[in-house]
Image (spheres, rainbow, N blue to C red):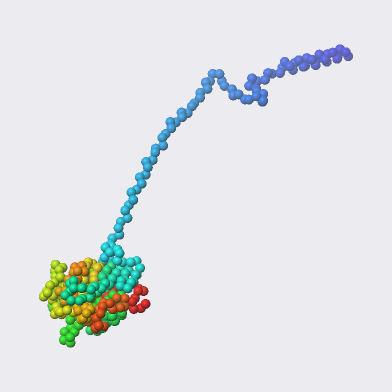
Amino acid sequence: MKRLFIICILCLLLACSGNSVSQAPAPSSYVPSHYETIPRTTPTEETVVISTPTPEPTETPTEEPTATPEPTEVPTPEPTGLCGNRFPDVFTDTPVLTENSYSDSGLSITITRYDDNFEICRHIVVYYVADVYVQDIERFETAAATDFSSYDIDYVRNIAERNDAMLAVSGDYFNFTDGKYANKGLVIRNGVLYWDRLDEDHDLCVLYRDGVMKTLEAGTFTTEEIIAQDPWQTWQFGPALFDESGEPKGKGQFNSSITGIQPRCAIGYYEPGHYCFVVVDGRNEGYSLGAEFWELAPIMKKLGCTAAYNLDGGLSAQIEFNGKTQNRNFGGRFIGDIICFRAEEGYSPYHK
C-alpha cells in the first residue's frame, strides 16, 4: 500500500515534467496585445519611398485693368419746327400770358407800341408791332368772315372772336368788290386753293409751308407756278415794300394806287418761323396821321425785316390781342378776312 502510494506520486511528477517539455514555444510573430503592433519587413526587400514632387507655383495672370470708358457725348437733338432751337428763350413749356405778350411751347407773341417822333416819318406817327414766333406753320392761320368761298364781310374783332384768336390783324380783303370787279386774285388759305385767278395788277405775297415768305412783283409769275409749290398762304393786295435786293423802295416805286398818308397794316418776314405785323394808326390829328408807302418801308427795314408786304389799311387796319383792340382806328370797318394765331387750348381770350 505504501509502495503503491509512492508509485502514484512518481507518476504525478513524471506527468508534470512531461507537460513542461512538450509545450511548444510561442511563435516569434506573437506579440502580447498590450504592445504596439510593428509591421514586419523582409530583410531582402528595400523600402522605396516615392515622393511626389511639389509643383512649381504657377503665377495667376494679373488681369489687365479695364479702361474706364470715355464719357460719350449725348448728341444734341435735331432742331424741330420752323424755328428749330434758334430761339430757346421765346417759347415756354406752359402758357404764359401778360398784358402785352403770350407764349407757349410753339407760339410767342409780343406787342410793342412805337412813337416815331419824326425819326422816319415827317409827321407824328404811332404804330404797333406784333413780334411773332411759331414752330408749326399750321398755327399761322387766316380766317374769313364766314368762309373763303363767299363775299361775306365783318369787323376784325368779330372774326377774331369767332376763331378764338389770341392775335389778329386785318388781312388783304380778298373778296373786295365795288359792284363791278371782285379782287380775288390767287387765294390759297391754310393750304387750300379757293380761287385761281391771275391778277396782273397787284404784287403777290406767298408764305410757304417751310416758313419762308416771299413777295413777287405783278406780272413776274403765273398762278400755275405758285400752286405747284403748294404754299400755305397767299395774299394779293400789296404792294411789296422792298425791292429784289431786300432794300426799302423809294417814292414812285410802289405798285399801288392807294397812296398818300394812310393808316397802314403790313406783314414783315425775318426768317422761317419769325414774323411781325405792323399797324400804323392814322387820320387822327395830334396823335397819329398815318404813313406813306415810302415811310412804311423804312419802318419795316428798321425792325430788321428781310421782306415786307402791305395789307389792307385805312379803317381796316386793326390789331387785336387777347380780346382787346390795341390801336385806335375809330372802331374799324368791315373786311373779308384776318391773319390770326390761337393760343393753346384753355387760353381763349373770349371764353375764359
- At x 41%, y 37%, the residue is 60
Q: Position of residue 182 (x, y in %)?
A: 18, 83
Q: Is residue 243 visible?
A: yes
- Residue at the bottom extreme of this rendering: 179
Q: Residue at x 28, y 60 (%)?
A: 78
Q: Residue at x 22, y 79 (%)?
A: 286
Residue 143 placed where, x, y %? 26, 78
State the image quarter where residue 207 is shown. bottom left
For the N terminus, the quadrant is: top right
Left or right for 239, reference 95: left
Query: How many numbered discs, if any?
Result: 0
Tell me residue 159's x, y (percent): 28, 80
Q: Can you name the residue that lies furthest to the left here?
A: 252
Up the image or down, 297 lies above or below 329; here it is above
Where 88 falls versus 262 (above or below)? Answer: above
| Residue at the image point whose x is 46% and y is 28% from the top | 53
Closest to the observer: 297 or 88?
A: 297
Give the farthest residue toward the right.
Answer: 1
Between residue 142 and residue 26, name the one nearer to us: 142
**Residue 352 percent coordinates (x, y):** 37, 77
Q: Quadrant of residue 291?
A: bottom left
Residue 206 shows in this picture: no
Q: Quadrant of residue 298?
A: bottom left
The residue nearer to you, when weighing 31 against 128, is 128
